[in-house]
Image (spheres, grey):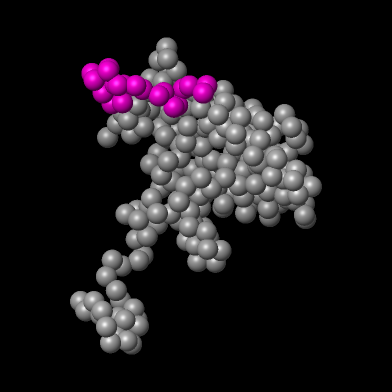
Amino acid sequence: AGKGTGMVEKANELAEKHGWFLCHQFETDANWKFHYDTTGPEICNDLKSIGSDLDYFVSGYGTGGTFHGAGKYIKEKSPDTKIILAEPGAANLIGSGIKTDRHADGSPLKSHPAFAAHPIQGWTPDFIPLVLEKGLGLQDEMVEIPDGVSVQTSQALARNEGILTGISGGATMWAAIETAKKAPEGSVIVAMLPDTGERYLSTPLFASIDADMNEEELDIARSTPSWILEP
């Protein structure tokens, strides 16, 4: 399998073959600048409207656009805000200190040596995106996400808080919870949960839920006379 680098190479091939537009989301400055113009101001303006400061901003990364753009804006407007960047413990590319080798357009030349398969879909491909690399230095702290906690936290958010987010959302929330454990009492923490759990129905996030009704669910269905889907 070509992993993330293979994905980028295939997209390049298809675009060249068919004359399609290639957005270069891992390399283009338009990515992080959009979050600088929108996501960052939205966070700061919302907190300003309730008279609140922002103590911590917590984010993971896929392309790095949210972290770079929103983080840059937040740091400019609120220099005391601490930015926490999270990545999988199994694929601590930033933590390794090893840079990604690149083609002239900024795309990855090869797979990063610190990469290993991890369960957080949408996070941390097998290279450091150029969009992310250009924003490194904004973070005040790195958090490594252990295996398993992303799914557990996402499930807990749905069960206890009514928030249906995906595996990467669970990872970010875990990092935010760990940040909160060390933060001074009363700290304001913003965590980015950019995806919905509906995108993960065929993933390990829902693996513990059977496709067919169990006996408890069948008993509920049988408690009234109509429209009983018997197995």
Which residue is pictured at 32% across the width and 86% down the height? 224
Residue 5, picture quadrant:
top left
Residue 118, picture quadrant:
top left
Q: Position of residue 180 (x, y in %)?
A: 68, 53
Q: Position of residue 223 (x, y in %)?
A: 33, 87
Q: Quadrant of the C terminus?
A: bottom left
18 relative position to 192: left or right: left
Q: Position of residue 194 (x, y in %)?
A: 51, 45
Residue 185, above or below 64: below
Which residue is pictured at 65% across the width and 29% down the height? 72
Q: Residue furthest front?
A: 226
Can residue 17 be seen here?
Answer: yes
Q: Quadrant of the N terminus?
A: top left
Residue 91, above or below 145: above
Q: Residue furthest top?
A: 104
Which residue is pictured at 77% across the width and 55% down the height? 185
85 relative position to 76: left or right: left
122 relative position to 187: left or right: left
Point out the stretch of residues depicted in magenta.
9-30
Residue 27, above or below 198: above
